[in-house]
Image (cartoon, grey):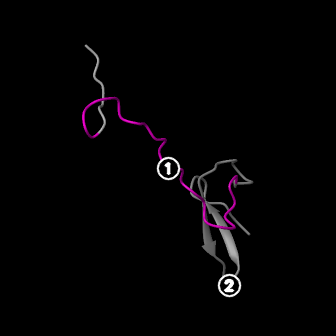
Amino acid sequence: MSATVLDEDGTGPAPTWSPPRAELPRGAPCNLQCPSCGSANVAQVLGDNGGVSYVCTACGHIWS
């Protein structure tokens, strides 16, 4: 027997919604990859003199 989720008054099937999309912060790169190993496991960090640098959490490579 299959289950059906009913709407609030129990008369018909409940409407379905797509889950909300996770949105990237404005200006965040969406396809950043490590130039050394190609991994997408990259963190954005503050550089020594206020700039932005990136570090690969897979291999440890740092670049800006």
Report whether 20 appears left or right of 62. left
Queried whether the magenta region covers residue 51, the answer comes back as no
- Up-down relation of residue 1 to residue 41 (above or below): above
Please tell me whether mark 1 sits on a helix, a strand or a loop. loop
Q: Residue at x 54, y 50 (%)?
A: 21
Q: Position of residue 49 (x, y in %)?
A: 69, 86
Q: Quadrant of the C terminus?
A: bottom right
Horizontally, residue 43 falls left or right of residue 12, namely right
Residue type, mark 1 in image = Pro
* Residue at image mark 1: 20
Read off the residue under disc 2.
Answer: 50
Place residue 5 in its image quadrant.
top left
| Callout 2: SS | loop
| Lower position in the chain sequence, tag 2 or tag 1 | 1
Dominant secondary structure, magenta: loop
Identify the residue at image location x=66%, y=60%.
61
Q: Is residue 22 magenta?
A: yes
Residue lying at the far bottom in this picture: please name it.
49
x and y, in percent, of residue 34 in the image: 69, 54
Q: Residue at x 49, y 50 (%)?
A: 20
User: Which residues make up the magenta segment?
Assistant: 8-31
The one of 3 and 34 positioned closer to us in this rendering = 3
- Quick check: marks 2 and 1 in contact, CB under 8 Å? no
In which quadrant of the rendered image does the N terminus lie? top left
* Local crowd size for mark 1, using a 10 Å CA cut-off: few (<14), some (14–19), many (≥20): few
Vertically, is 45 above or below 1? below
Cα gap from disc 2 to disc 1, whole angstroms: 34 Å
Between marks 2 and 1 in the image, the one whose residue lies nearer the viewer:
1
Which is nearer the eye, 8 or 52?
8
Residue at image position (59%, 53%) is 41
